[in-house]
Image (tube, grey):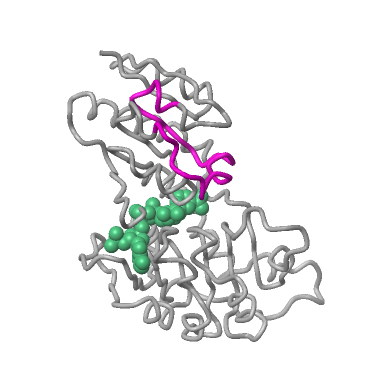
Amino acid sequence: MTLVIASQLEAGFNDELRDHPARPQVIDVPEETPWDAAKSADVLLVRPSPVWKKSLSSPRPDLWPGRLKWVYSASTGVDYYPKWLLEAPLVTCGRGVAADEIADYIISAIYHRAKDLEGARVRSLSEWRQIPLGRVTGSTIGIIGFGAIGQEVARRVIALGANVTAVRRRDQASPVVGVTLLGSISEVVASADHILLALPGTPATQKVINRAVLAHAKPTAHLINIARGSVLDQDALLEALDSGRLAYATLDVTDPEPLPEGHRLYTHSKVRLTPHISSNYLVVRHRLLEKVANDIALFTRGETPSDVVDAAAGY
Ligand SMILES: NC(=O)c1ccc[n+]([C@@H]2O[C@H](COP(=O)([O-])OP(=O)(O)OC[C@H]3O[C@@H](n4cnc5c(N)ncnc54)[C@H](OP(=O)(O)O)[C@@H]3O)[C@@H](O)[C@H]2O)c1
C-alpha cells in the first residue's frame, strides 16, 4: 500500500521526499486547517506554522486523528502545537537535526561575552590601554536541560577547557564524560559563569527560571536562552540585569515571538537578542530530510522511528 504523507514543509523538500525508495505519495496540507489532512493521509509532517500557534487552545477536531498513524514534528519542541496533536498513535520529532548549529551559536555567544574583541578594539593611540578579558578555559558552563543540544555544547566546551555542570529531568547518567550532573536547577545556576537554558517548553518548565532561581546566580554570570521564551520569567530577567544580579543575557527566543515594538529586551544594554535563528534551518534542512527518510524506512519496515515524543512529559 502506498504511504500517504501530508507535508507542511516547502515544495522542494516534498519533491525530495517523493524520491524516497518507499515511493510515498506526498500531498499538501490545507494551509488554514492542517488537521484536515487526517482524513486522507497516514503521516502528517508538521512545522510550527502560525496556524498551529493560533489553534493552541482549540478543541480537538472531530475526525482527529482519523486515518493518521504518525505525526512527525520537524521541530524538536512540540509546545507550538495544540495538545490533541500529541494524541496521534505515534508522534516523533526532529530532535538533533540542528543541535550542532545551535551549539555553535552558543559557543559564539560565550566567546562574545568572555572575549569581547569588538569592545577591546583600538582605533587610535589614545585608546591603547589594558582591558581585562574574561575566560572560557577554566570557566563553568551550567546546562539546564541536557539533551541533544546540551550534550553538543558540553562536548565543545570541555574541549575548550571549561567545566560543565548540568541538570536533566530523569535520573540518568551523563552520556558525555566529564560533565557533573547536579540535582537541581538552582545548584547549576549558582556555580555557572554561563547559564544555558536548553530544556523544552512544557507545563513543568513554565517560567522555571524565575526570581528565586536567578537569586542564586553569580552577579558576573551570562544567561543564554536558545530553548523557549516560556521557560524564563522575562520580568525577573530584566530585574536581575537592572539590579546587577546578573551581568548579561543572550536570547534567541522570547515570549511572545516576536516581542511587541518598544519591548525593553530589544534595546537593553545587557541583552543581545536574535530572532530565533540559532537552528540555521536552511543549512540543516538536508539533515532533516535525511532523518525523515531514515524514519520512513523504519516505519515501512514496521520498526519504530527515532525520537518518539512522550506526550505526558510534553517533549
Ligand atoms: N532556538 C531554536 O531554534 C531551537 C531549536 C531546537 C530546539 N529548541 C528548543 O530547545 C529544547 C531543547 O532541545 P534538545 O534538542 O536538546 O531537546 P531534548 O534532546 O529533548 O533535551 C531536552 C532536555 O531537557 C531536559 N528536561 C526536560 N524537562 C526538564 C525539567 N523539568 N527540568 C530539567 N530538565 C528538563 C530533558 O531531560 P532528560 O534528559 O532527563 O529527558 C533533556 O535533557 C527543545 O525542546 C526546543 O524547545 C530551540
Residue 157 percent location from the top left of the image: 40, 64
Tell me the magenta residue range: 37-63
* Quarter holding residue 301: top left
Residue drawn at 32 percent across, 14 percent down:
23
* For residue 125, side relative to residue 63 (left or right): right
* For residue 305, side relative to residue 250 (left or right): left
User: Does residue 124 appear in this view?
Assistant: yes
User: Does residue 158 appear in this view?
Assistant: no
On screen, 188 above or below 26? below
* Quarter holding residue 290: top left
State yes or no: residue 91 in magenta.
Answer: no
Residue 118 percent location from the top left of the image: 68, 65
Residue drawn at 28 percent across, 72 percent down:
181
Residue 163 percent location from the top left of the image: 36, 73
Residue drawn at 43 percent across, 42 percent down:
60
State yes or no: residue 45 in magenta.
Answer: yes
Classify the position of ligand 1 by quadrant: top left, top right, bottom left or bottom right. Answer: bottom left
